[in-house]
Image (cartoon, rainbow, N blue to C red):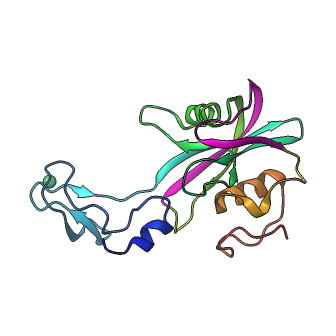
Amino acid sequence: MADGTDHQRLQHPHGSGWARYCPRCAHGLEDRRVDVEQRLRKVCPACGFIFYMNPKVVAAAVPRQGSDIWLLRRNIEPAHGLWTFPGGYVDLGETVPAAAVREAREETRLDIRLDGLLGIYSYPESAVVMVVYRATVVGGEPSPTPESLEVRRFGPDDIPWERLAFPSTRDALEDYLGIEAAPRGARKTPVGKE
Ligand SMILES: [Zn+2]
């Protein structure tokens, strides 16, 4: 696919032009209308494999300590240098809650206990579905990691709204703090605290 701009807009490319070869037999894929929905899919004419493009699941948690929460400043793209709560892709063979606990450990060195689901966040322009839990810090020594430039504790009034990594970061923190927000989808980029 020639259009690199569209690729950069997504957190990972999943446009119709992304896959070129069959992952099963390495034949070139073709665009065909398949199944009941008749949507254009990448199909292998040699072995019949259909390359469905689906979002990936990200497990995340907002770790609470007293009335504060812990955030990290990302040391990886996308959104390098911006703030979010710990989270990452769920591995095959791992549960979503286990992934949320593991990612918190990997990105902040904090041990957390999950306290229930905060919300599920997805957007048409994003290739991931975010599953975000409420959590409590139960141990560990917070410190930067290869994935985080900085790990810091924020009071509810000190959240760096202007420097959050993703729309889901903002939406989840608004839900967490019980902040009445503008209708979902009305914002394209994080803006200041209304
Ligand atoms: Zn094939």
Q: Is residue 93 above or below residue 43?
A: above
Q: Is residue 132 magenta?
A: yes
Any part of residue 50 in sight:
yes
What residue do we see at 32% from left, 64% from top?
Answer: 18
Give the quadrant of residue 141: top right
Question: Does residue 56 sit above or below 93 in this rendering?
Answer: below
- For the N terminus, the image quarter is bottom left
Quadrant into which the C terminus falls: bottom right
Residue in front for this viewpoint, 185 or 77: 77
What residue appears at the point 67 percent right and 44 percent down from the top-left corner?
Answer: 149
Residue 132 placement (x, y as % from top left): 65, 46
Seen in the image, is 181 located left or right of residue 87? right
Left or right: 96 as drawn, with respect to 153: left
- The reply, left or right, for residue 22 in relation to residue 39 is left
Residue segment shown in magenta: 127-153
In the displayed structure, 155 sits above or below 97; it is below
The residue drawn where x is 39% and y is 62% is 14
Q: Residue at x 71, y 67 (%)?
A: 190
**How far across and down, in percent of the image, does residue 191 sit?**
75, 70
- Residue 20, percent from left and from top: 23, 62
Residue 148 screen position, x and y as percent: 64, 42
Residue most toward the top? 139
- Residue 179 appears left or right of 114: right
Residue 86 visible, this angle? no
Quick check: is 67 in the magenta stretch? Answer: no
Q: Quarter of the picture for ligand 1? A: bottom left
